[in-house]
Image (tube, grey):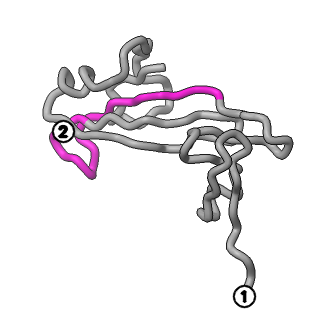
Amino acid sequence: MSPTPQFQCPKCGRVSYNPNDAFHRYCGACHSFFNADGEDESLSVIWSIFENTTDAPGKFVARRFFASARGVQPDIGFTEDTIEQARARIPPGLVRIPPQPGELPTVVESYI
């Protein structure tokens, strides 16, 4: 039997046995990606609000993503009945940006 891939975060010391975390050198506790030298490669947090998705028809879904040089990693999310309710739950201090070319048509807005 081969050993389970694991990743120990150089920042907080937690160990993940998720093979994707090990492959991407990602710590779910710190929400950070690390290079082979243990340096944090995380770039930013992005919140996006979607409307009428297949998993929540007729609702507004907000999802948090972590973007780094390794790509975009989805994290948590929530569903609300109105855009106002979804906006109220986005953390304060972020800047609203409209949908960008090439984004899914269900994207209403994003925050960085």
SS under mark 1: loop
Crowd band around label 2 with a 10 angstrom C-alpha radius: few (<14), some (14–19), many (20+): some
Residue at screen point 28% across, 37% down: 61
On the picture, is 111 further left or further right than 17? left
Give the residue number, with chain letter if any, for mark 2: 59
Give the residue number, with chain letter if any, for mark 1: 1
Residue at screen point 28% across, 44% down: 53
Q: Amino acid at mark 1?
A: Met
Residue at screen point 49% across, 25% down: 101
Image quadrant assignment for residue 106: top left
On the picture, is 32 further left or further right than 109? right
Q: Is residue 7 above or below residue 35?
A: below
Residues drawn in magenta: 43-60
Residue at screen point 69% across, 47% down: 9
What is the x, y in percent for residue 103?
46, 33
Q: Amino acid at mark 2?
A: Lys
On the picture, is 35 further left or further right than 31? right
Crowd band around label 1 with a 10 angstrom C-alpha radius: few (<14), some (14–19), many (20+): few
Image quadrant assignment for residue 33: top right
Task: Report how far apart the C-alphas of labels 2 and 1 lie in the structure.
Answer: 46 Å
What is the x, y in percent for residue 58?
15, 40
The answer to whether marks 2 and 1 mark residues whose Cβ atoms lie closer than 8 Å is no
What is the x, y in percent for residue 55?
27, 52
Q: Which mark is residue 43?
A: none
- Viewer-proximal residue among 36 and 66: 36
- Viewer-proximal residue among 101 and 41: 41
- Viewer-proximal residue among 110 and 88: 88
Q: Is residue 50 magenta?
A: yes
- Quadrant containing the N terminus is bottom right
- Which badge, 2 or 1, is on the more N-terminal residue? 1
What is the x, y in percent for residue 112?
48, 20
- Tell me the chief SS of the magenta region: strand
